[in-house]
Amino acid sequence: MQNYFPPLDFFPPQDLAAIAVFALAWVFYHFAIERGGPESLNGRMDQHRKRWMREMATREARMTDAAIMASLQNGTAFFASTSLLAIGGAATLLRASDELVKIASELPLGILTNRAQWEAKVVGVIVIFGYAFYKFSWAYRLFNYTAILMGATPDAKTSDEATRFVAADRAAQMSIVAARHFSRGQRALFFALAYMGWFLGPWVFMGTTLLAVFTMWTRQYRSDARAAVLFGETPAPKT
């Protein structure tokens, strides 16, 4: 009976260690950011999304809100299209595996690989970009739902203020969910760049993975973007 699974020694131990570091880093960062509370940049922006929808509910003319939502949808569509193009570009690498393996072996970096290993790495790239495309396309759909919920929010002249703000909060929650999936798609793109280090060797792969995590983490907690969001806020008193 033919065995369709690769042998345990398909990759050297250092490559297996590198892919384990990559997977654990992605999982750790995912849970650390999404359960990190309101202090991250994403958490702060979620608070402003809620405030935006509350302000939207008090306006009679909502053309500005519709324009903002359209820009969010266009940006999401752009990244979805980019991910799809990246999938096609990575797929073309499979057709030139022999030439690329030969070129890699002639580089002064001492890269040792064969066609099967090279193609397995390329398949990994396709999987990552496929995940990113799925997240961006779903985020685009969720932003459509957000626009519908915004349109369903009662007019500012409505006397039932409680119903109006409940509808605004509902749209805010949908917007937060859409942004969360969009962030996951962007996270996949960053990790895809880190994954490219594997083509230069397992140690480079580990280094690019840790660099990607460090860069994304600092953007959430130590970036000038977060400082801009916090600008003007009174710091909480120390206890």
Image (cartoon, grey):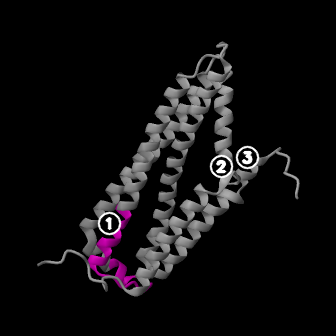
What kind of residue is marked 1? Val
**Is residue 113 inside the magenta stretch?**
yes
Residue 221 in percent (x, y) is at 70, 58
The residue carrying mark 1 is: 123
Q: What stretch is highlighted in magenta?
A: 103-126
Q: Is mark 1 on a helix, strand or loop?
A: helix
Instruction: Give the alpha-carbon distance from disc 3 to disc 1, as whole Å.
Output: 39 Å
Residue pushed farthest left? 1
Instruction: Give the alpha-carbon distance from disc 2 to disc 1, as whole Å.
Output: 34 Å
Rendered view: 74 above or below 197 = above
Using the image as rendered, state which of residue 171 and residue 103 is in the foreground. 171
Residue at horizontal 40 percent and vertical 46 percent from the top: 81
Q: Is mark 2 on a helix, strand or loop?
A: helix
The residue carrying mark 2 is: 43
Instruction: Specify which label sits upstream in the sequence, 2 or 1.
Output: 2
What kind of residue is marked 3? Val
Rendered view: 107 above or below 143 = below
Residue 233 in percent (x, y) is at 82, 45
Q: What element carries label 3?
A: helix
Rendered view: 129 above or below 25 = above
Rendered view: 153 above or below 239 = above
The residue carrying mark 3 is: 229
What kind of residue is marked 2? Gly
Residue at horizontal 63 percent and vertical 62 percent from the top: 217
Give the side of residue 43 with respect to residue 8, left or right: right
Q: Give the mark toward the camera: 2 or 1.
A: 2
